[in-house]
Amino acid sequence: MIKNLIFDLDDTIIKDEEEDSIFYKEALRNCGYNEERHYDIYMAIDEYEKYITEDNMYYSKEDMLNTINKILHTNYDIKLIDELLRVTAKYWIKRIIIKEETIKKLSKMYNLYIYTNYFTEVQSKRLENIGYLKYFKKVYGADYYGCKPIIKSFDKVLEDMSAKPEECIMIGDDKAKDILVANKIGMKAILYDYNGKKDKKICDVKNYIVLKDFDKIFEVLAQIS
């Protein structure tokens, strides 16, 4: 019996848009750095996750800083990371993908959780800013629980939830990060392909349902449950 829905956050509930990197200008300005490198930093942070391994599976401000400095050949201070996270939590909420009424209804039917490859405090604040945090039992971030799709990380999340894989459905937009790990641990999965491009990504996953219109989530859940 399905009891729990585990959501990804970026590009599932809140759109992660490159143009929002302009908000990094504020962080750079506050730290006394060149504002025009805001997009370079956005791209370097995007690369950071590629350095995550099973032996070093947790998000770290220090590791993120080192990755930025390595890629951009810079010498930024850790205070910049704190500022980048602050502006992300404050401003990176422009486009909400899933309607609040849908999340609210789901929260009355299932236990809702967030599992995100980013910092817990930042993601929790973003959800609070859009009024959605109250619908979720807990936000699991990569700084405390490790990154998807590392199985050991997901095991930590399930242990904290006191849940079995067969009691959960993973809902996310990324085949490699969200759907692959669900396949590996025997959890059902829904690929949220809101723009028609997510299912085109080449990845060796088979057992999942593609959802293009979230208004139809209740029909899909009825079939799965």
Image (tube, rainbow, N blue to C red):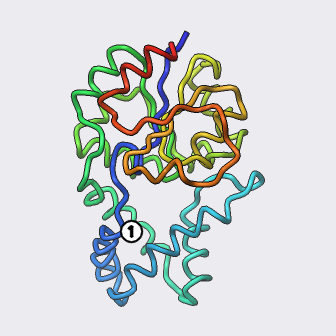
Which amino acid, by three-letter code, is at mark 1? Leu
Q: Residues within 10 Å of mark 1 (few under 14, many from 20)?
A: many
Where is 52 relative to 111, above or below?
A: below
Q: Is residue 96 left or right of residue 2?
A: left
Location of mark 1 (residue): 84
Q: Nearer the viewer, residue 63 or 96?
A: 96
* Image quadrant in which you'd find residue 219: top left
Residue in view at x 34 percent, y 21 percent: 106
* SS at mark 1 in the image: helix
Q: How many marks?
A: 1
Q: Position of residue 35 (x, y in %)?
A: 32, 86
Residue in view at x 55 percent, y 73 percent: 65
Q: Position of residue 178 (x, y in %)?
A: 57, 42
Q: Is residue 38 left or right of residue 186?
A: left
Q: Residue furthest right?
A: 55
Q: Position of residue 176 (x, y in %)?
A: 62, 49
Where is 145 relative to 58, above or below?
A: above
Q: Nearer the viewer, residue 87 or 77?
A: 87
* Image quadrant in which you'd find residue 88: bottom left
Residue in view at x 63 percent, y 54 percent: 202
Q: Position of residue 169 (x, y in %)?
A: 53, 26
Residue in view at x 38 percent, y 68 percent: 84
